[in-house]
Amino acid sequence: MELDELSQSGIRRIADYSPYLDQLAGLAQQMGLRQRSNLSHVETALRSHWSLGQNSILSWAPLDQAILILVVPHYAIAEYTSAQDGTMPPRVSPRFVTELISGDRQLTLTQIQKVARLLDIEPTSIPLRVPLEGSEIETRIIEKMIRKYGINYVPSRAVTLFDIVGFSLLTPFEQMTQLNSLSYSLNSAHAKMLEADVNIDFARSSSGDGFYVWNRDDGLEASVNLYHFMHIVLADNAIAKSKSTTKSVPRLRACFHVGSCYEFHQAEGLNPSTHDFIVGDVTIELARMIDAALPGQILVGDFMADIEIENENGEITVQPNVDAVTFLRRAQGNLAQLSGIVLSGERVTAIKCYLTGENMGGGQFNIRRLTISDKHGLSRVAFNAKVNIYRESAQPILLGIQDKKLPEPNAA
C-alpha cells in the first residue's frame, strides 16, 4: 500500500473507530501515521471483545508485536468475590478486584499471567500491525481505551450535584428549557474558568432533576477547581434568574461531596457511549443530602479523603485524611486566580467562600454541623456553605443561605 493510501486509510479508521485519538488529537498528532493506524486497529479489536457491553476489559500488557488483554463477562467481576456454590470460598478477595479496576491498567507479562490464573481465564492476544513504541503518549491512549471498555473504581472523587427545585411540578416544556438553561450555565462556567487559566475537564451525568458533575482530572487541585466551578455555575444561574421573567431559568440547590465511585460507559447501540457515568458512595450521599437541602442552599458533605497532590517536580504524593473544613480553607486560599473573570459584563474583584456557623463574638464564628436524616432512618453530617462574589460596579452575588435562616431542628 502506498503511503498516501495508508494515510487516507488510517484517517478513515481513526475517524470511525478511535474516539480517544480524536479527543487526544494534540497528543495523537505527535505520532506517525503508522502508529495512529496501529492504535486504531487496537481500539477496533477492543470493541469487538467488549461485545456490545457483554464483557469488561480488565488489564493489558505489551508482548512483542501484540498486546495481551484480560476479558471477562461483566457479571463475573462481582462473582469473583462471592462464595462459589454457597460453600467454596471466593476465588479472590474484594480488595484484589478493587485494585485490579483502580489506577493504571497496564501490567507486566508476569503480572497478567498471575491474574489470569487467579481468575481462571486465558489472556487474549491482539496482534499489532507494527510493534508498540512504548512512548508515554502511546501508553496513555491505550490506557484510556482500556478504561473505556471496562469498569473503573475511583477511591476519592469530588462530585457536585445541581438540583432543579420543583422540577416534577413543571410542564415538560418548562423542564426542557430549565435543563437547557442549567446546561448552558455549566458550559459558560467552564469557558470562564479556562479563560482564567483554571483547568477543569468536567463530566456530567443526569440525575433526573439535574446533573452530577465531576472533574475527570484527579488530585486536590482538581477537586478545589470543581468546588469553584460550582460557584461560577450558581452565579451564572443567579444572574440569568434575575433577568428572566418566565420559568425558563431554574432555581437551584447544590451539594458537594468527596467519596468513592465506579465510573463506566454504557452501550449505545453498537458503541460504548462517549459520556461517562458514575455511581457509588459519593452519589448516594449526594442524593440523600440534596433531599434535605432548601431552595438556594449549598451543602458540603462531611468527608474525609486521601487526595493526591502533585508538586512542582511533577511528583505525586498523597495527603491523607483531608476533611471538609481543611478542604474549604484550601479552596479559599486559591480563589485569587478567579479574580478578574467577567460575570454579566462586570469584572469580579473578589470571591469569598466559607462554611457558616454561629457568631461567637469578636468577629469569630464556629462551624455548625447539620444532621440530616433520610427516609431509611440513616443520618449524616453536612455543612452549610455560603459564597459571596464581589464585582466592580455591580451588586455582589450572594449564594447560599445564611446560617441564621436555617431551621433550628436541622442543627445538631
Image (cartoon, helix red, strand yellow):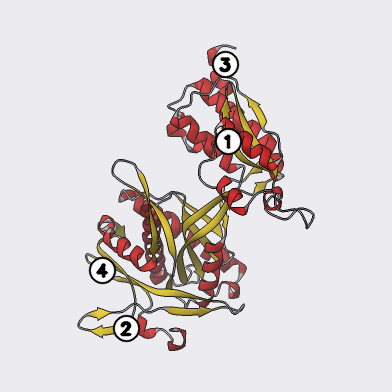
N-terminal label among 4 and 1: 1
Q: Residue 398: where, in percent of width, then height?
A: 33, 73
Mark 2 against mark 3, which lies toward the viewer? Answer: 2
- For mark 1, give the secondary structure: helix
Q: Which residue is mark 2?
A: 358
Locate residue 11 relative to residue 412 in the image: left or right: right
Q: Which residue is mark 1?
A: 111
Q: Residue 70: where, in percent of width, then height?
A: 65, 37
Are the two marked residues, 3 and 1, in contact with CB atoms closer than 8 angstroms? no
Q: Which residue is mark 3?
A: 5
Q: Is residue 16 visible?
A: no
N-terminal label among 2 and 3: 3
Q: Residues within 10 Å of mark 3 (few under 14, many from 20)?
A: few
Who's the residue at 63% across and 39% down the image?
A: 115
- For mark 3, give the secondary structure: helix
Q: Residue 159: where, in percent of width, then height?
A: 47, 60
